[in-house]
Image (spheres, rainbow, N blue to C red):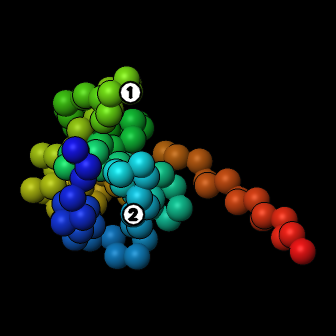
Amino acid sequence: MATEASFVDYVLEQADLGERLTRRRMFGEYGFHLDGKFVAMACDNSFFIKETDAIRELDLDLPRRPPYPDAKPWPVADELLDDAPLLNQLLRESAKHLPPPKPRKRRKQTS
């Protein structure tokens, strides 16, 4: 089951990060990037946050499960969708623990 666009809109609204948090469609699901860093994904209308030390530092006990078949378990942050300030903080802190995005290679133009 693919994630509904309304769920993704709700996540963006609750995160309250404006244009800093973007979504990108990926294989029928969505990836979330904060300041260009991949921080989370939505799969089957659940919100999965990338594993970083921010989860431990904020003392969060998030359940874990695979976002899609044959994937390793990821922390599920669905419960934080009802706590917008904590969701915002987790996303910002998670991004701090991630390396900067790699520069994209330019495609060669063919004539």
Would residue 93 be seen by someone viewing this image from the given angle? no
Q: Quadrant of residue 107?
A: bottom right
Q: Amino acid at mark 1?
A: Ala
The image shows residue 83 at horizontal and vertical percentages of: 13, 56
The image shows residue 102 at horizontal and vertical percentages of: 67, 53
Instruction: Answer with left or right where residue 35 lies relative to residue 40.
Output: right
Q: What count of labels does the image hold?
A: 2
Looking at the figure, which quarter contains the N terminus? top left
Q: Residue at x 53, y 62 (%)?
A: 36
- Please tell me which residue lies in front, 54 or 20: 20
Q: Is residue 31 above or below residue 106?
A: above
Q: Quadrant of residue 109?
A: bottom right
The image shows residue 65 at horizontal and vertical percentages of: 25, 28
Q: Residue at x 26, y 49 (%)?
A: 2
Q: Residue at x 39, y 36 (%)?
A: 51
Q: Residue at x 33, y 70 (%)?
A: 17
**Tag 1 residue:** 71
Q: Is residue 2 above or below residue 76?
A: below
Q: Is residue 21 above or below residue 111?
A: above
| Earlier-in-chain disc, 2 versus 1 | 2
**Tag 2 residue:** 23
Q: Quadrant of residue 30?
A: bottom left
Looking at the figure, which quarter contains the C terminus? bottom right
Q: Is residue 21 above or below residue 42?
A: below
